Amino acid sequence: MKTKTLKKNKVNVVTLGCSKNIVDSEVLMGQLKANNFLVEHESTKDDASIVIINTCGFIDNAKQESIDTILRYADAKKAGLVDKIYVTGCLSERYRPDLEREIPTVDGYFGTRELPRLLKTLKADYKHELVGERLLTTPHHYSYFKISEGCDRPCSFCAIPLMRGGHISKPIEELVKEAKHLAKNGTKELMLIAQDLTYYGLDLYKKRNLADLLKSLSDVEGIEWIRLHYAFPSGFPMDVLDVMKERSNICNYLDMPLQHISDNMLKSMRRGTTKQKTIDLVNQIRDKVPGIAIRTTLIAGYPGETEKDHQEMLQWVEETRFDRLGIFGYSHEENTHAYLLKDNVSAKVKEARSQAVMDVQQEISFELNQHKIGNTYKVLFDKKEGDYFIGRTEFDSPEVDNEVLVKADTDYVRIGDFANVKITSALDFDLYGDVI
């Protein structure tokens, strides 16, 4: 029995997973609004008649969260609190037959490239003139900016090609148009994302064309920071670094998931590189752009990873001194190449190895942050929490990197504005300072 009145034309979009999913939800919401739907992102009111869940299917934890969310709204539908439930995104792309069988309460399952079909089901038109327009779910001063879809890389552990398909670059003109629209609406920072940034342009322009894209985007008036995420190391286009040095609005920041350093692991992971090539690449990047912040992501407990492989990774992390680092326990994903291997590292060992790497990184981060005391940085302020305004330097991305905290009772800044901040103290992952 219904206990509340639902708004018949209201859609609640729930997003799980990565920043690529966030962009997909924002595009969906833009299309729905243009079709005169009331639309909210992760509404706390639960008064929408339609719920669309944009799922993640990347690793076990993410899959479980997606399933739990679907079940929660399935129960809400049975209780009369929701009229219709639709599921889209990576989990739906990968496991649609299983989901249709196990959770039939859902009114429709859609894949990662089926936005027009989803809109048609809702009796909405796909409006081609809206290409590049979306409803931001992030604060308006920064935006995730997807430059391509899918991936052609053969990494053994990764299911993304199964869910997202092959690599498709967006044309430069289309991306510039999107950037201009975002800038007009107050966006100051673009965070370039893709399954693989460095592959950009190979399909359209027959060459790696990220450098030319960066030049075009950096010319867009109002865009003050451009940040690079998900750059694959193999075949990295070094001309990108030349543009980074030339253009003041391209952040000295590079997110490059390296995954491991042991030659045995890199070969089994099908990463197309070696330990020495990886070390040389990091050194070349740092030589070419002094002061660049490099963020990386690693995997612990990949099949066959020995204690020797783990110690080799630990030593390399200690020697390389990455500015930012994250690590995940290996997830055994069906239909990937690595699924043929035995998942022979226990969950307990994966966790212990991940923690050992993060303990080393925490010390490195603390030491690097101590060297920032007394320096002044340009900071973009994202939010106010408690007694502090919280922002980031050009060396930090939202949610995953260091934050700069400024006392709200002594300094005032506007959210979404830049200010120069002198660092007065530092912890492992936080900097404290005063506005100059």
Image (spheres, rainbow, N blue to C red):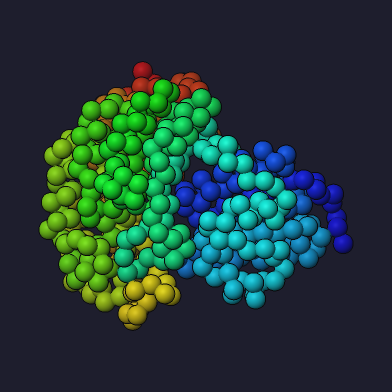
261 up-or-down from 285: above or below: below
Q: Among all residues in the image, which is located at the extreme top?
A: 436
Which quadrant holds the N terminus?
Answer: bottom right
Q: Quadrant of residue 327?
A: bottom left
Is residue 226 in view from this perspective? yes
In the image, what residue occupies the spot 77% across and 45% down? Answer: 9
Judge by depth and name the residue closer to the eye, 106 or 369: 106
245 displayed left or right of 165? left
35 displayed left or right of 149? right
Judge by depth and name the residue closer to the eye, 203 or 132: 203
18 displayed left or right of 315? right
Q: Residue 283's x, y, as percent?
A: 14, 46
Q: Residue 121's x, y, as percent?
A: 70, 56
399 up-or-down from 113: above or below: above
In the image, what residue occupies the spot 45% across and 37% down? Answer: 174
Q: Residue 149's x, y, as percent?
A: 43, 52
349 displayed left or right of 236? right
Which quadrant holds the C terminus?
Answer: top left
In the image, what residue occupies the spot 60% across and 46% down? Answer: 28
Is residue 433 in view from this perspective? no
